[in-house]
Image (cartoon, rainbow, N blue to C red):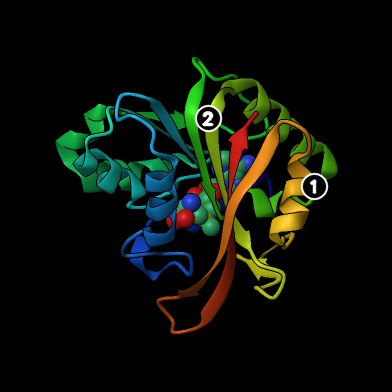
Amino acid sequence: MSTRAHWDSAWQGADPEAKSWYQEEAGHSLEMIEASAIAHGEAVIDVGGGASVLVDTLLELGFQNLSVLDISRAALQSAKARLGSRANDVKWLCEDATRWTPAHPFRLWHDRAVFHFLTDAEDRQKYRTIAKANLVPGGHMIMATFAMDGPEKCSGLPVRRYSAQSMAAELGDGFALIEDSIEEHLTPGGRVQKFQYCRFLRV
Ligand SMILES: C[S@@+](CC[C@H](N)C(=O)[O-])C[C@H]1O[C@@H](n2cnc3c(N)ncnc32)[C@H](O)[C@@H]1O
């Protein structure tokens, strides 16, 4: 099954609030976005945003140049339906994060629980190349993956787990690690999953 077919079937007709990665509030992400202190008019993207409510909060905070990218049209539909008319204030990009051409550069790049599915080195290289070319110097990149002692699989797919050090090594030159923290995410099913959050400055 292709990556797109996998995720469309995971999202089609599903209750987003029952998904293991569901958060009522994207608290850790918001703290790091706040710490990045970027202006509300700057371009922000949530890569693999799925049906996350992060975009709702960013709209409420006054961000005006928001993009949400996801490989699954069904995921984007779910987020758009939740937002109603506010969805018109967001750019929705149905793209594979390893194979797309951004229309403009970004000041803030956010990825929670997407990069860790890239088990193929070539896919990681492609993702990195796109991020590096399209995040402006002085911009911020927030990467949240399963931590070293987090789950080995998600949505039936294997993942790569990261520490702050291994994520810094993975991104390589051009990204300076500014802060990192662990989130103990409680799934709707009551399990704890450890996430590694890292914020990088594009240098
Ligand atoms: C585990 S969910 C996380 C969703 C969201 N970031 C959150 O924290 O709630 C992973 C998301 O990444 C999307 N995804 C997986 N592989 C992708 C890829 N190669 N390009 C873009 N999106 C992808 C899936 O459709 C899904 O919405």
Q: The residue tagged with tag 1: helix, strand or loop?
A: helix
Q: Nearer the viewer, residue 105 or 7?
A: 105
Q: Which residue is mark 2?
A: 139
State the CA–CA distance, disc 2 to disc 1.
19 Å
Residue 16 in the image, given as x and y percentages of width and height: 37, 61
**Residue drawn at the location 81% of the way across and 46% of the way down:** 120
Residue 167 in the image, given as x and y percentages of width and height: 72, 51
Residue 13 versus residue 108 in the image, above or below: below
Q: Horizontally, is 124 left or right of 85 in the view?
A: right
Q: Nearer the viewer, residue 89 or 140?
A: 140
Of marks 2 and 1, which one's residue comes earlier in the chain? 2
Q: Name which residue type carries label 2.
A: Gly
Q: Which residue is mark 1?
A: 169
**Residue drawn at the location 69% of the way across and 75% of the way down:** 149
Q: Horizontally, is 18 left or right of 5 in the view?
A: left
**Which picture quadrant has residue 116?**
bottom right
Q: Name which residue type carries label 1.
A: Ala
**Which picture quadrant has residue 17?**
bottom left
Residue 66 in the image, given as x and y percentages of width and height: 35, 31
C-beta proximity under 8 Å, tags 2 and 1: no
Disc 2: residue Cβ within 8 A of ligand 1's nearest atom: no
Residue 32 in the image, given as x and y percentages of width and height: 45, 50
Q: Residues within 10 Å of mark 1 (few under 14, many from 20)?
A: few
**Residue drawn at the location 29% of the way across and 42% of the way down:** 58
Q: Is residue 5 visible?
A: no
Q: The residue tagged with tag 2: helix, strand or loop?
A: strand
